[in-house]
Amino acid sequence: MVHPSVPARSVPEFIAYAKANPRKVNMASSGAGAASHLAGELFKMMAGIDMVHVPYRGGGPAMNDLLGGQVQVYFASTPASIEYIKAGRLRALALTTATRSEALPDIPTVAEFVPGYEASYWAGIGAPKATPAEIVNKLNKEINAALADPNMKARVADLGGDVLALSPTDFGQLIADDTEKWGKVIKTANIKPE
């Protein structure tokens, strides 16, 4: 999403604006190496643009400076930004997820303009490695049952999220795939721990 002062109203317009103004677009993040930073670095790499990374100590300060116009773009999660988007205080150019959101159906995905781009924020529940399989399977069954509840799905959708009920094996694969993907972004962007 961008501050309303940014003249771009779409991803292609934003890419053109950033290319015409190299290193003059400030990209907020909630900290070096945070999900918002990685999503922005992936976008920079795939779109071929050069923005200045401005790391903050958390999402709140980053959002405040985006709202105030001190930075121009921020790759925040939908739950953290949806109310500002709906109120018109920020302009959502696209979602970083693979698919459009039920909460913001008119907002396209970045991948509709930058093929292959996807940066999803997800949360999951894990157990220690030595946890017996029957306990892991029982937890998985109960958690997935809760996620299937219509009230739970509706609340998650209201926040701009999607329920992703996976098996333990599929969740492990998601973690492995994302570890590989984001490791490449970190290496390419030369991101170092602070």
Image: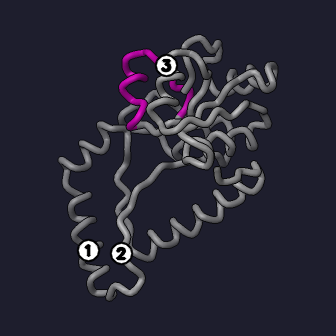
Looking at the image, which residue is at 48% across and 72% down? Answer: 172
| Badge 3 amino acid | Leu
Mark 1 element type? helix
Mark 3 element type? helix
| Badge 1 amino acid | Leu
Q: Is residue 93 magenta?
A: yes
Earlier along the polypeptide chain: callout 2 or callout 3? 3
Looking at the image, which residue is at 38% across and 67% down? Answer: 166
Q: Is residue 126 left or right of residue 74?
A: left
Earlier along the polypeptide chain: callout 3 or callout 1? 3
Which quadrant is home to the N terminus? top right
**Is label 2 or label 1 in front?**
2
What is the CA distance from the residue labelled 2 to the residue labelled 3? 38 Å
Q: Which residues are magenta?
A: 79-94
Q: Position of residue 176 (x, y in %)?
A: 57, 69
Looking at the image, which residue is at 49% across and 19% down? Answer: 67
Q: Is residue 59 left or right of residue 74?
A: left
Q: Which residue is mark 1?
A: 139
